[in-house]
Amino acid sequence: MSEQENEPQGEQQKLEQEKKKLAEKLGIWGRFEPIEGYEETKEFNRIRDIDRRLTEIVVG
């Protein structure tokens, strides 16, 4: 497998880790105990961006 083929997997792992950290901070990972107004935060917007990129990586 070439280095270029590994890039999406590495990016995917980094994005998944970042998403988990952000979701934990907002209280929406594991037990669902969200902070008030979490949907309006920059962290939640970043999670949406990450989800879009993960979809691109997985679907192609």
Image (spheres, helix red, strand yellow):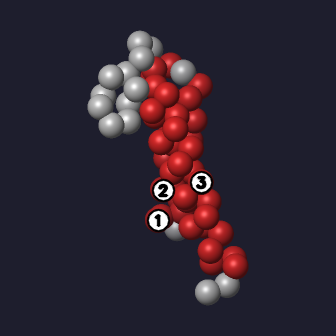
Residue 28: % across, % down: 38, 30
Residue indicated by mark 1: 59
Mark in the foreground, 3 or 2: 3
> Which one is earlier in the sequence, the residue at label 3 or at label 2?
3
> Which one is earlier in the sequence, the residue at label 3 or at label 1?
3
Query: Is residue 45 among what the camera can see?
Result: no
Q: CA distance from mark 3 to mark 1?
A: 17 Å
- Circle 1 packing at 10 Å, graded few (<14), some (14-19), many (20+), is few
Q: CA distance from mark 2 to mark 1?
A: 6 Å
- Circle 2 packing at 10 Å, graded few (<14), some (14-19), many (20+), is few
Proximity of marks 3 and 1: CB atoms separated by less than 8 Å: no
Q: Quadrant of residue 2?
A: bottom right
Above-or-below relation of 10 to 6: above
Question: Seen from this angle, which residue lies furthest left?
Answer: 31
From the viewer's perspective, tell me whether residue 39 is left or right of residue 13: left
Residue indicated by mark 3: 14
Q: Which amino acid type corresponds to the residue marked 1 in the rendered image?
A: Val
Residue at 30%, 28% (x, y): give it. Answer: 32
* SS for dot 1: helix
Q: Which amino acid type corresponds to the residue marked 3 in the rendered image?
A: Lys
Q: CA distance from mark 3 to mark 2?
A: 14 Å
Proximity of marks 2 and 1: CB atoms separated by less than 8 Å: yes
Above-or-below relation of 31 to 36: below
Looking at the picture, tell me which residue is in the foreground, 12 or 24.
Answer: 24
Residue 55 badge: 2
Residue 7 badge: none
Q: Which amino acid type corresponds to the residue marked 2 in the rendered image?
A: Thr
For the N terminus, the image quarter is bottom right
From the viewer's perspective, tell me whether residue 34 is left or right of residue 41: left
* SS for dot 3: helix
